[in-house]
Amino acid sequence: MRKNVGALYAFPIGLWITLFFVVPISVIVLYSFMAKGLYGGVVFRFSLDAYRELFNAALLHTALTTFLLAAVSTLLTLVLALPAAYYIARSRFRNTLLLLIIIPFWTNFLIRIYAWIAILGNNGFLNALLLRSGITHGYAHFLYNRYAVVIVLMYTYLPYAILPLYSAIEKFDFSLLEAARDLGATRTQAVFRVLLPNIKAGITTAVLFTFIPAFGQYAVPQLVGGRDSFMLGTVIARELTVSRNWPLASAIAAALTVMTTLSVLAFMRLNRSAGELIRESVP
Amino acid sequence: MKGCRVTVERVTKSFGSFRALREVSFSIQKGEFFSLLGPSGCGKTTLLRLIAGFDDPTAGDIRLDDASVVALPSNERHVNTVFQSYALFPHLSVYENVAFPLRLKKIPEGAIRVKVGEYLAMVRLEEHRDKFPARLSGGQKQRVAIARALINEPEVLLLDEPLAALDAKLRQHMLIELDTIHDTVGITFIYVTHDQQEAISVSDRVAVMNEGAVLQIGTPREIYESPADLFVARFIGETNIIEGRVTSTAGSRAAVDVPGIGTVTVESAKPLRPGNVVSLTVRPEKLVVSREKADLTGDDMICVQGIVEEIIYTGFLSKYFIKVGETTLRVFRQHANHQAAGGRAITWRDPVYLGWHAGDAYVVEVRGS
């Protein structure tokens, strides 16, 4: 009898994931059930203190903010990425355009955020432009609020949304749009009833690739956010490094993982009937 | 008769410097089964796309009955298309594909169910209604595409090489089915194909196209029996082209001297004068071949001598390639039970006699004077 060697091929990545994902996650979950050490670290004694602290108004508010910022960024990213991906897929210069989408990855992520600070800051490019042209008098405060966070999150995840959408649209048979028009659909109807349902897989991937990392973001709210845009990632970092409350930081991290998983599952569930939804909700 | 007249008037379509259509004009009758026939790249599909509204003509006008449709987007034309690739919506079932145009019109669910059922019955797909396109055979996809295109009750149905993706047997079958559907719905059909066999077997009239122009419009019999030029003569079926010079005329008759063959008599509706250079076409099935000259005598019978070069057996007939002088003439001969005249079948290298009736040689082109 022939043995299935597939499992063997998967062994290296299995080992990798066990070492660098399963083990750390387990440690975090374990720490979240420990007592807090006086100067950081944990005392190896079972305690639910961290989870008791978890349910306070400020933290719940931060969780809600995190969800909203991630959701709004995801939605706006999708709205921007769809037409861009469509255009690239239909363009003769698709390879060049795809390269242009990927080029920002050649620069360090933090440097790109600082570039945004240089653009949006009080002495930044945008303010200089507005002042010079006389549209504003005095600085407009673009930075250190939730709008800045959404803008930079969108910027960060746009390529991750465009690429899966592009590959879905690129495989789409465009004569289907002509068929839809031929059968009486307006341009909008053709897009909503034929294009979108047929690139559903690409849309799902784009949403997951944007929402999941945005939900756990730490650097963006830290660098361009303000008091209205604390995100769970920021709070975890603060508890870990400033308050040195490791069990609480671990508990928040665990909660964040659970929330992300639940959001994704809910989205996938919704997505299954997305075809129906789109058909009902559109003219 | 339902459907509407389709008038194409001096339509030109350019893609950059390439002229896909050059001042094409014709008119299609109500309820007619009209074919656009030509080799690939002749502009027939471009013309179909202009009528459907997927592209705009560079110049000229397209009218349904008397109303110009050039300015209308495709969803506002009473024209539907059966695409070569079928273009079925992969995310919808057979039922939903056919119901698609009705759902756009916000027709009540009950009415949709009745009508879709009716059209699925017409194309005999009731038991496949819940399948998705990926699970259908080529012929089934084809029938879904037809039902979907007809359910809007268009005035004109456009068919873009609808049978090209099917195998030969199925193609024959679908052709008969299309003919039946045309009789049932009674609307105007415009059928694009590169297959002359398909075009002449179902069409009321055929337009033969080449290089962006219409060369001839006529009934299948007209384009087969009296082709407008050498291209049409060669494109429709197989034929023998013979060139010669007119030596004398008498009424509609003329004597033509063909190098290597001799003098042949032709009947022509076109005026001929001595000295004209003419191209004749004689269909291979109209030639008679025999080893005995006696078999080929009779009034107006033209008889030449040749040698059998090649015989191709195709089942219901054999194709003989016979060298006469410098030219090779082809003869199709259907098999009879006792076909061997004189006891022995014609074979390779046999000296034979070839004959045809003067009226069967058609003068395609006349040049010079």
Image (cartoon, rainbow, N blue to C red):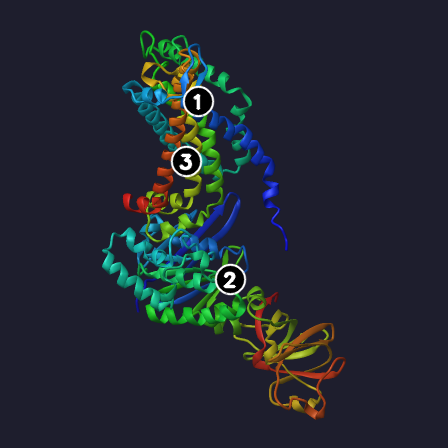
Rendered location of residue A19, percent (x, y): 55, 29
User: Residue beneath label 1, please?
Assistant: A31
| Residues flagged by tags 1 and 3 on a common chain | yes
Secondary structure state at the residue bearing disc 3: helix
Report the Cα–Cα distance between label 1 and label 3.
42 Å
Mark seen at residue A82: 3
Residue A83, label in figure: none
Is A109 drawn above or below residue B263 in the view shown? above
Tell me the crowding category of disc 3: few under 14, some 14 to 19, or many 20 or more residues within 10 angstroms, Cα based. many
Q: Residue at x 38, y 56 (%)?
A: B93
SS category of the residue bearing label 1: helix
Residue B338 vs residue A107, the one in the foreground: A107
- Tell me the mark number nearer the camera, choosing from 1 and 2: 1
Which residue is at 32% across, 7% downward?
A138
Q: Identify residue type, mark 1.
A: Tyr
Using residue B52 as the reference point, say whether residue B199 is left or right of it.
right
Kind of residue at disc 3: Leu
Q: At numbered mark 2, what does the secondary structure look like: helix, strand or loop?
A: loop
Placement of the N terminus of chain B among the 4 image quadrants: bottom left
B229 and B21: which is toward the camera: B21
Alpha-carbon span between mark 1 and mark 2:
68 Å
Q: Earlier in the sequence, mark 1 or mark 3?
A: 1
Along the horizontal axis of the image, is B251 left or right of A151?
right
Q: Horizontal and vertical percent for residue B27?
A: 39, 62
Q: Mark 1 lies on which chain?
A: A
Q: Are the residues under marks 1 and 2 on the same chain?
A: no
Task: Give the chain letter at badge 2.
Answer: B
